[in-house]
């Protein structure tokens, strides 16, 4: 039977090589800052970000090490399908030690169901049809660093997102097998990760979603990432993937789904956690927890992935590309400006691989002269909602910041 525990050899093996290194100054850091803060693709600190050093992972930018949080720089997100080594990391507690046969790992389904069950990963694989989708995974705090004044939490730019291929079974199929009662309203999901204090008898986080979202066909219990078994750092042996919503609902190291007859109230579901104001509040103010709504569908966002922020160009012809996405919705348009928003040119936007996959965009632009330029991108979703010029609807924990994306380029004469 697969178990989670606290034995040291397993953790040492999985996290072999974990460390942080500081990179030297880059061209991007030497250029003047974009807008009021810094380039929205890479931190503008003179010494650059601290970089992750972990076996099997790219050199992501480390935002915190307790718990481990690391984002993917925009230029590393240039792939159409996010490689596993480039997928961001967001932990809430410690990484559990996993031993034994992964197929023996059990997930309990209980609460408002007719047939409570404890099902193994092996049974999930053999009793339910497997599906594979390219699905967005995005931290609820993605974009937090763009708020002024600074909000609490990890200061993400746009790198708390990725769109890899996930293989698993539909959560709906499993819940149907358990038999949802008419009283079923919400899920409550639990993982095996110990708290930062090492406690295994209480959850480090436990979030959930309304039953309608859980029953959506793209909500998965996933056991493969990009065709390979899930790595431990990304939730092995099995995790939830609830696409388009904050990744905190995509519970890693999944071991229980509690079906509730009311909105779930686990850690991470109350107060200001993953909530945004119903009524706009004064930036920097305390806010009122009673006037907050749960963050559900993530906001519309675009990122330029090529060229990298701070690039030197030898030609005035600029061929750029990137991705755009909008939670539960599709992208209608992406527009590009090289004159600080005075004029805009439409980019070519590709259809998504499937619902909840990001959409690639590209554009070819002729810059008028050599010199310094800011390249801006803004996306509009299928509801007609467009990215704002600066982060809006400030809230104490910094959710929903999605200003237009900006990079800096220097065209040499």
Image: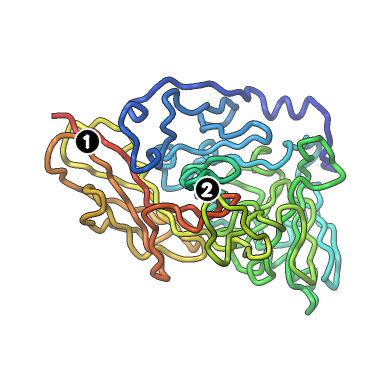
Left or right of 227 in this view: 96 = right
Left or right of 27 in this view: 411 = left
For mark 2, give the secondary structure. loop
Q: Residues within 10 Å of mark 1 (few under 14, many from 20)?
A: some
Chosen colour scheme: rainbow
Where on the picture, by quarter, is residue 193?
Answer: top right
> Does label 1 or label 2 sit earlier along the sequence?
2
Left or right of 300 in this view: 9 = right
The residue labelled by disc 1 is 372
Against 51, is 101 above or below?
below
Front residue of 383/322: it is 383
Front residue of 108/405: it is 405
The residue labelled by disc 2 is 142
Image coords of residue 386 (percent x, y): 38, 62
Q: Is residue 251 visible?
A: yes
Image coords of residue 182 (percent x, y): 78, 79
Q: What residue do we see at 50% from left, 41% from top?
A: 83
Against 3, is 166 above or below?
below
Against 162, is 119 above or below?
below
Front residue of 52/113: it is 52
């Amino acid at each position: 039977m697969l178990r989670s525990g606290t034995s040291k050899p397993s953790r040492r093996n999985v996290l072999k090589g974990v460390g942080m290194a500081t990179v030297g100054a880059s061209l991007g850091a030497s250029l003047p800052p974009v807008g009021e803060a810094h380039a929205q693709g890479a931190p503008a600190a003179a010494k650059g970000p601290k970089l992750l050093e972990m076996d099997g992972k790219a050199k992501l930018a480390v935002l915190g090490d307790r718990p481990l949080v690391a984002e993917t720089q925009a230029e590393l997100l240039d792939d159409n399908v996010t490689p596993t080594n480039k997928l961001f990391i967001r932990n809430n507690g410690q990484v559990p030690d996993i031993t034994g046969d992964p197929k023996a790992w059990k997930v309990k389904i209980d609460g408002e169901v007719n047939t409570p069950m404890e099902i193994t990963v092996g049974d999930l694989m053999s009793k339910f049809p497997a599906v594979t989708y390219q699905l967005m995974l995005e931290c609820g705090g993605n974009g937090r660093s763009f708020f002024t004044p600074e909000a609490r939490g990890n200061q993400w730019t746009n790198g708390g997102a990725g769109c890899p291929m996930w293989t698993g079974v539909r959560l709906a199929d499993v819940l149907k097998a358990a038999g949802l009662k008419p009283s079923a309203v919400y899920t409550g999901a639990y993982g095996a990760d110990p708290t930062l204090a090492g406690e295994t008898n209480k959850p480090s986080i436990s979030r959930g979603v309304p039953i309608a979202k859980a029953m959506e066909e793209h909500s998965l219990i996933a056991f493969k990432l990009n065709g390979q078994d899930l790595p431990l750092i990304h939730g092995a042996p099995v995790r939830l993937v609830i696409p388009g919503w904050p990744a905190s609902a995509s519970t890693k190291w999944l071991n229980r789904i509690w079906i509730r007859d009311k909105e779930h109230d686990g850690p991470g579901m109350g107060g200001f956690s993953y909530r945004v104001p119903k009524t706009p509040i004064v930036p920097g103010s305390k806010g009122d927890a009673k006037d907050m709504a749960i963050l559900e569908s993530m906001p519309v966002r675009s990122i330029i992935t090529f060229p990298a922020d701070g690039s030197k160009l030898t030609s005035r012809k600029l061929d750029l590309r990137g991705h755009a996405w909008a939670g539960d919705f599709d992208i209608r348009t992406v527009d590009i400006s090289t004159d600080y928003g005075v004029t805009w040119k439409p980019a070519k936007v590709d259809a998504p691989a499937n619902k909840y996959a990001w959409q690639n965009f590209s554009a070819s632009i002729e810059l008028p002269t050599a010199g310094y330029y800011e390249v801006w991108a803004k996306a509009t979703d299928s509801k007609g909602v467009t990215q704002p010029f600066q982060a809006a609807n400030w809230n104490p924990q910094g959710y929903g910041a999605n200003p237009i994306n900006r990079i800096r380029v220097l065209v040499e004469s």
